[in-house]
Image (spheres, helix red, strand yellow):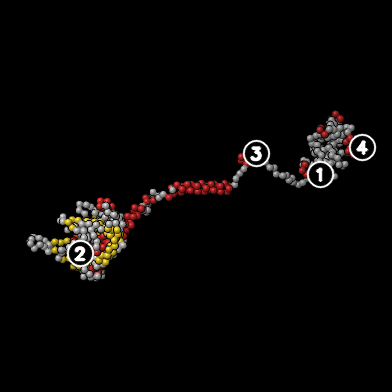
Amino acid sequence: MTQQPADLRGEPSTDPDGRQIPEDQQPAPGPSSAAHRSPWAAPLGSGAVSSGGAATSGAIPASNSTPISDATAPGSDATAPGSDRDVTQEYSPVPEPRTEWARVAAGSPEPSTPEAWFEQPVTRVVNVPSSARRTWPLGLLLSASIISAVLASGATFLALNASGVLNRPNPTASSAPGSLSAQQQVSLEESSAVITAAQKVSPAVVKITSSASANNADPNALPDTGIGSDVVYDPNGRILTNRHVVAGSDELTVRLKDGREMPGRIYGYDTLTDLAIVKIEATNLPTAPVGDSSKLKVGQLAIAIGSPLGTYTNTVTSGIVSAMGREIQLDNGNTIHDLIQTDTAINPGNSGGPLLDSGGNVIGINTAVARNAQGIGFAIPINIARPIMDQALAGQKLARPWLGIRYQAIDPQIQKDHKLPVDHGAWVTGGESSTGQSTPAIVANSPADKAGIKEGDVIVRIEGIDIDAEHPLESVLVQFPPGRTVSVEVLRDGQTLKLQVTLGTRPADL
């Protein structure tokens, strides 16, 4: 049962059993001011409302303890007898008033207590330093890092490329396993060229042995025997060799690489150089390809094949073309012009053998070595030998064109010493023979004499070919057969004259 609190008009109070409480034990009346209300009093808008709509005082929930009244002061309007407010209404206080749902308009139905309380979640506010409040997504940070790295790498590449560092060869590339330096690569290519050339030409290189009868005046004299090398250039048995290898022989024996031996005979001698043609009776012989010596360059590869010392047949050596246009004098007093100089090993027994280029083409015929020196050998250019090779193929007698003059090749020093008008060409001038006798510049009744060439003339051009260090006079003349009429340009007294000369046949005793 709900206990009804005592009114506030001085009437005695009773206990819960209905017994009257003594006056000295009754509680003193509280103040009427709102400032002295019990802290348990319900505020305006609480769950208790008056019947007249005005706010009434609140009461604490019923309990075993003595209730505390909340009354207005005596004599106030709120407690005047006969007013509507003097009746205290009975109500059941709410467990704990909540402003969010308890404030209802006056005259509204009294809300019921909900089965469950729905409170808004409490959001805890944490004071975070301003520097740590801004956060960046992880993907954005990664993207920014990658872009920065790419830009930095690109700038570094551009700087290195501009300085040329990236274009430098790798100094350690040659030391890597399986890699080759430039020098090693060149050596490998040269080695391959030598191997290929040797395989290509060796079958066409033969050894020739010449024998001469003994001196009948000396009973103890032995037959003279010489050994040299030769190269087959015609499958029907025509062989090119040196003149000094076969000259004066009574018998020739040719030994092929396959071991066959057969007799040979001298087809003819070259009256201009130290060359000869030998013929053997055979067919389908392996031959060596003939090259072009006019295209040679100093420093290019040169390969020699022959029989050094007459014992070591088909020996292959290699070197380079050391120089061009060399001139040497033989033991018999003859002079050979326009020779190839090479450091390829050439020994006795190599004479007559071929000198090859890197393609295995014959560019010269080995003919001599310098005495008291090493690595100085000489070969006759194949272009000088070509005319007599063709003559032998045609079955003609070997012959060289003849002009009939003595001359001196002009160079800057000769021009300066003799005050000549040009620094190249052939200066027609006399001289002395090997015996010290004076020799004329023009041979009487020679092709040059008949054409009107005079001593002191400078021959500068034949058939449009300039006469200079690369094109000596004899090298140009051998291109034309005897009996051919050619145009010869000469300088005389500051004028250029064009003369027509019909070439003769060179005498064998020159």
Q: Which residue is mark 2?
A: 445
Question: Which picture quadrant has residue 24?
Answer: top right
Q: Nearer the viewer, mark 1 or mark 3?
A: 3
- SS at mark 1? loop
Q: How many marks?
A: 4
Which residue is painted at 63% across and 39% down in the image?
130
Q: Kindly identify which numbered label has been placed on residue 104.
A: 1
Badge 3 or badge 2: first in the primary sequence: 3
Question: What quarter of the picture does the N terminus occupy?
Answer: top right
Could you say where residue 437 lies in the image, as x and y percent from the top left?
16, 56
Badge 3 or badge 4: first in the primary sequence: 4
Q: Kindly identify which numbered label has been placed on residue 82.
A: 4
Q: CA distance from mark 1 to mark 4?
A: 29 Å
Q: How many residues crowd mark 2 within 10 Å: few (<14), some (14–19), many (20+)?
A: few
Which residue is painted at 58% across and 48% down in the image?
140
- SS at mark 2? loop
Q: How many residues crowd mark 1 within 10 Å: few (<14), some (14–19), many (20+)?
A: some
Q: CA distance from mark 2 to mark 1?
A: 157 Å
Amino acid type assigned to the residue bearing label 3 in the image: Asn
Q: Is residue 170 above or below residue 204?
A: above
Could you say where residue 95 lies in the image, as x and y percent from the top left?
78, 41
Q: Residue furthest right?
A: 82
Q: Kindly identify which numbered label has been placed on residue 127.
A: 3
Question: What quarter of the picture does the C terminus occupy?
Answer: bottom left
Amino acid type assigned to the residue bearing label 1 in the image: Val
Amino acid type assigned to the residue bearing label 4 in the image: Gly
| 338 or 42, nearer to the observer | 338
